Image: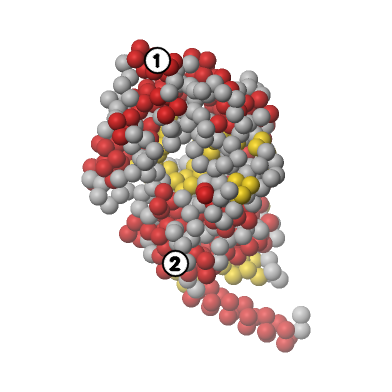
Amino acid sequence: MNPKNSSIFILLLFLNILNLISQNDVIIPKPNEISFRKETFQIDQKTIILSNEKTYKSAYLLKEYFKNSFDISLKISEKTIQKTNVIQFQFDDKIADEGYKLTIVNGIINIEASSEKGWFYGIQTLIQICDYNAFYSKELKSLKLKEATINDAPRFKWRAFMLDEARYFKGKEQVKLLLDEMAHLKMNVFHWHLTDDQGWRIEIKKYPRLTQIGATRKSTQIGPLEWDSPIQSGEVHEGFYSQEDIKEIIEYANERHITIVPEIEMPGHSSAAIAAYSWLGTSKNDIEVPIKFGVGTDVYDVADPKVYQFLTDVLEEVMALFPSKVIHIGGDEVKYNHWKSSKSVNEYMKKNNLKTPADLQVHFTNNISNFIQSKNRRMMGWNEIMGHNLHDYQQKNDTKTSQMLAKETIVHFWKGDIELATAAASNGYEIVNSFHNFSYLDYHYKNLPLSKAYSFDPIPEDLDAKYHDKIIGLGCQMWGEWIPTRGNMHFQVFPRIAAYAEIGWTKKELKDFDSFKSNLSSLEKRWTEKGIYFAPNAEVEKN
């Protein structure tokens, strides 16, 4: 390098370091305690990652990141061969399970945690510091970042994203992409909606017709009128995950400390299964997998012992695949007219002293809960499983119930007044809040702009403080009726998923929408590089 070029290089290096010191600190979700200093730390080829057997996965993750992102090759060592220019992991049992402490000071990057999850989230923060808050010199193969101290832990233990693939199958690569972005944003539950009226997407070996028949529909309702549209695509839509696919995706999620919670809908939203095996339905009629979206044409015959056996067989295979301690059974939007018109169902209700269809649903749900609990798992379902009257199509008297939902159930609140959430919490149920007006990603941005999504608080404003600990977190839901392509899905999910990540992680009093929105530009660069078609600024605040 000639002297003139050398001088220019040194000047540019100096100016970039000054810019590094003065720039905003971009970390999403926002940490709960953070302070940066003017002093800098340099990561280069001489930096060592100190690790033992317990922290090797974390060390290897960092090694791969620096190589792939910056072409900086770091050595992993079990022995302390230098006192500075090191990245190290330490155990501290006083830190919360998913929490961490990250310090960058005096030539050492130290990540303290009480679990592998904590180290993982500390690494995600370090990655964001390196990606968005550092100066990289390609010529020197070095990375300069500001010294910092960060103490951090999540506000809620349940930070979920839901993908509905029953309506449109997306495939392994898109699921893995979503898992990558969830991990980057410290989300920890992937709620996988695998069955519904319009499709069955998981292989069940004992019942092969579920995917032979239930995974294919001959056409699909489309058009700008959406729910009222008379237009059909005229194209077959199909797809499902083999059990080997499921195992591969679960392993991928586990590596990112994400629990996959499968949802197998029952007793409603079951038309695809009934199309495969007509004896499952209350009417016992042959039906096709529905083309039209909305609530399906039949529901499971919960009075038939063979149907109960079918459902427990399915759950048996599902639980053999998924290690999640929670199994979601749906339970929403069950049209009771099917049961009311069935002689055998009415006889079953009389025999079991069940006065209303809501009694029957809670009774059935508790039987399923007993089975799930016998496998050391826990049931979760949408809040209709408590017997709540949420829909105009139900007759008021049909939704009255004297039955009490199994106490171990997690109630997934999506619709209804605050009194319903209060009733659930006061009766001891844990609640995941996914109130649709604030968390449904299929809603257009004009109805759910980014600012409204960010304003969501999973703890309802009027909920008595003594019940606050019953709200264990939130979910954001990507319902699939009107998102046929990956581009449609990306547009609806990004950037709103980042807002939900910050809601789930950051203390309420530390949130700031203007700061959050200005920081999104850094995430948008990442999304662009990954081929994610996020909604631009002009769209996310549409009125």
Residue at 40% in and 24% down: 340
Q: Are marks 2 and 1 in contact (CB under 8 Å)?
A: no
Cα separation, mark 2 vs mark 1, equals 51 Å
Residue at 61% in and 34% down: 289
The location of residue 49, given as percent across then percent down, is 60, 52
Q: Which residue is mark 2?
A: 543
- The outermost residue toward the right is 2
Task: Name the residue type under label 1.
Answer: Tyr
Q: Which residue is mark 1?
A: 348
Relative horizontal placement of residue 533, taking residue 32 as reference (left or right): right
Eyeballing the image, is 265 above or below 64? Answer: above
The location of residue 371, given as percent across then percent down, is 45, 20
Label 1 CA crowd tier, 10 Å (few <14, some 14–19, many 20+): some
Tell me the quarter of the picture where residue 428 sits: top left
- The outermost residue toward the bottom is 4
Q: In terms of secondary structure, where does tag 1 sit?
A: helix
Residue at 66% in and 58% down: 531
Looking at the image, which is closer to me, 111 or 220? 220
Query: Is residue 503 visible in this depiction of the protein?
Result: yes
Q: In terms of secondary structure, where does tag 2 sit?
A: loop
- Report the label total: 2
Relative horizontal placement of residue 366, taking residue 242 as reference (left or right): left
